[in-house]
Image (spheres, rainbow, N blue to C red):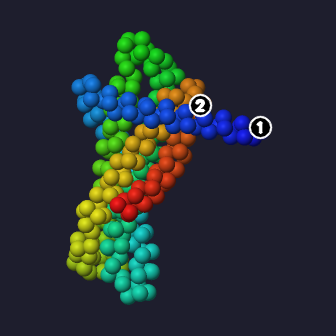
Amino acid sequence: MKTIETIGEKTIVILYSIGEATLLMFSALVKFFSNYRNWSSLIEQIHFMGVMSLPLIMMSAFFIGMVFTVQTYIVLQGFGAESEVGLVLALCVFRELGPVITGLLFVGRAGSSVTAELGLMKTTDQITSMKLMSVDPIARVVSPKLVAMIISLPMLTIIFNWVSIIGSGFVAQGLLGMDGGTYWSMIQNGVFFMGDVLPGLLKASVFGLLVGWVSFYHGLYGVSTPTAVAKNATKTVVQGSMLILAFDYILVSFLGFA
């Protein structure tokens, strides 16, 4: 009986946390449009989360495209289909690798940073000071960051996709000796926006919402001590990564059957 009680208590705590985080997300999305000042703050957050993440995203994409091309070329060469290496890479990147890897990098860079920032604001009583001045901290702080995440992650995914293809083309043409016209024409004729590109961008938007869902919850509702702030940032990275991978399967299954 004690074991059952423990499982029940933990289940209630988890469900309560999920409900609390979900209400926070809905509240942040609704309150974003209630204050025109959020638009200027949105630009700043897009710069911080999107533009400042570009070096990490572009460097990772370039080398991933290069490595994937070499490995794929070795396999396809055994079947006499090495000319398909560009198309295989493009389909994998647009459908899966782009949104998933960008999401994992994004939660490690931006998600943990947001959690730490909100945790420090809570530790130094800045959140409480806003409430005393009749300033809604969710509308002023959380809303612009959430919308910036939903916008930034698909934009970063687009950049990741094309940089990885450029890296792949660099290896395919420069090192493997493939014909450039054949490489690019295979990608152009085999990749379709509605069937390959758009589903990946939709997944990236969902991943941006998930990153915000986790990072804001741990930042605002986590224990507000200096040591706990670091642990909350770690929880954001771990749980955010797990959610991205889990929802990737759910979305792939849904979009595939649809």
For the N terminus, the quadrant is: top right
Residue farthest right in this picture: 1
Q: Quadrant of residue 13?
A: top right
Report the front residue among 42 and 195.
195
Residue shown at the point (42%, 50%) measured from the top left: 103
**Residue 135: image location, x then y, percent:** 36, 17
Does residue 245 lie above or below 211 as drawn? Answer: below
Name the residue that disc number 2 marks.
228
Does residue 129 lie above or below 116 as drawn? Answer: above
Closer to the eye: label 1 or 2: 1
For the C terminus, the quadrant is: bottom left
**Residue 231: image location, x then y, percent:** 58, 36
**Residue 136: image location, x then y, percent:** 37, 20
**Visible residue check, residue 249:** yes
Mark 2 is surrounded, within 10 Å at the Cα level, by few (under 14), some (14 to 19) or many (20 or more) other residues, namely: some
Q: Quadrant of residue 232?
A: top right
Does residue 190 lie above or below 148 as drawn? Answer: below
Q: Secondary structure at mark 2?
A: helix
- Earlier in the chain: of badge 1 and badge 2, it is 1
Residue shown at the point (38%, 63%) measured from the top left: 257
- Residue type marked 1: Lys
Name the residue that disc number 1 marks.
2
Q: Quadrant of residue 167?
A: bottom left
Calculate the distance from the C-alpha at mark 1 to the C-alpha at mark 2.
29 Å
Residue shown at the point (55%, 30%) measured from the top left: 222
Report the front residue among 152 and 171.
152
